[in-house]
Amino acid sequence: DGDLEKYRIIDEVSQISEISTKNVIKDAYTSIENNIESIPSLEEWLAMIFGAEYVITDSFHGVCLSIIFQKQFLVVYKNNTRGATRIANILKLFHLENRLVTEITRKSIEQIMKNSIDYNDVNDQLDKLRNDSKVWLNQELRNGATWRKNFSEVDMLNIKLLEMQSKLNNQDLLIKKLEGKLFFDEMQKQCLR
């Protein structure tokens, strides 16, 4: 989301790093240099992050993708903005709290940019978290999903209803496919006569 503070930070980073900028704000990106606006596709948005020298983000997904693509980044958010808790949690999880812009001054932005992210440490933590997730998932699969034991009878009935609805939807799709095939076969027969 665009606001004056974020534009000031983008401008400061651009001046400090001498990197040209593209803004992805409210589903449109603007090149500050030539004011060209267009709506990026998902692929274009991912490519912009992947190809970026430096990422300035105010979103949880921007942080996640910056980590996945091993980008130097900084985060701009206010405590009451959307996703603020998730952003704070993921930064803490990877010991990247120092990527947060708390003061909009050239000195504070330079300080963040000067301290590059050591992706060896981040990747070690990411590998540990992936492994922990795999262990938990395998354990739950072997133990018959113990998390379900915490559900009430009503919760379990709702789960069963959703499962049955999913099966019915799959059967409806199969019937429609068969009807379509039978119709196609009948049309083909009539054409051959």
Image (spheres, grey):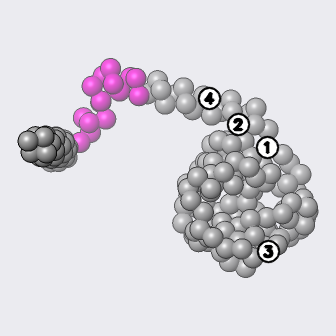
Compare marks 4 and 2 and give the one earlier in the sequence: 2
The residue where tag 3 is placed is 34
Gap in angstroms between the C-alphas marked 1 and 4: 17 Å
Main secondary structure of the magenta stretch: helix
Instruction: Tell whether position 60 is magenta.
Output: no
> Which residue lies under the disc numbered 1?
117
Q: Nearer the viewer, mark 3 or mark 4?
A: 3
Q: Is residue 85 left or right of residue 22?
A: left
Q: Amino acid at mark 3?
A: Asn
Between residue 10 and residue 78, name the one nearer to us.
10
Which is in the foreground here, disc 1 or disc 3?
Answer: 3
Question: What is the number of the mark on residue 122?
Answer: 2
Left or right of 114? Residue 39 is left
Q: Give the distance between the C-alpha atoms of the residues marked 2 and 3, in whole angstroms.
A: 36 Å
- Identify which residue is drawn at 66% across, 51% down: 47
Distance between the Cα atoms at labels 1 and 3?
31 Å
For residue 14, what is the image quadrant?
bottom right
Q: Earlier in the sequence, mark 1 or mark 4?
A: 1
What residue is at 8 percent from the left and 41 percent from the top? 193
The spot of residue 63 in percent (x, y) is 64, 52
Q: Cβ–Cβ below 8 Å for labels 1 and 2?
A: yes
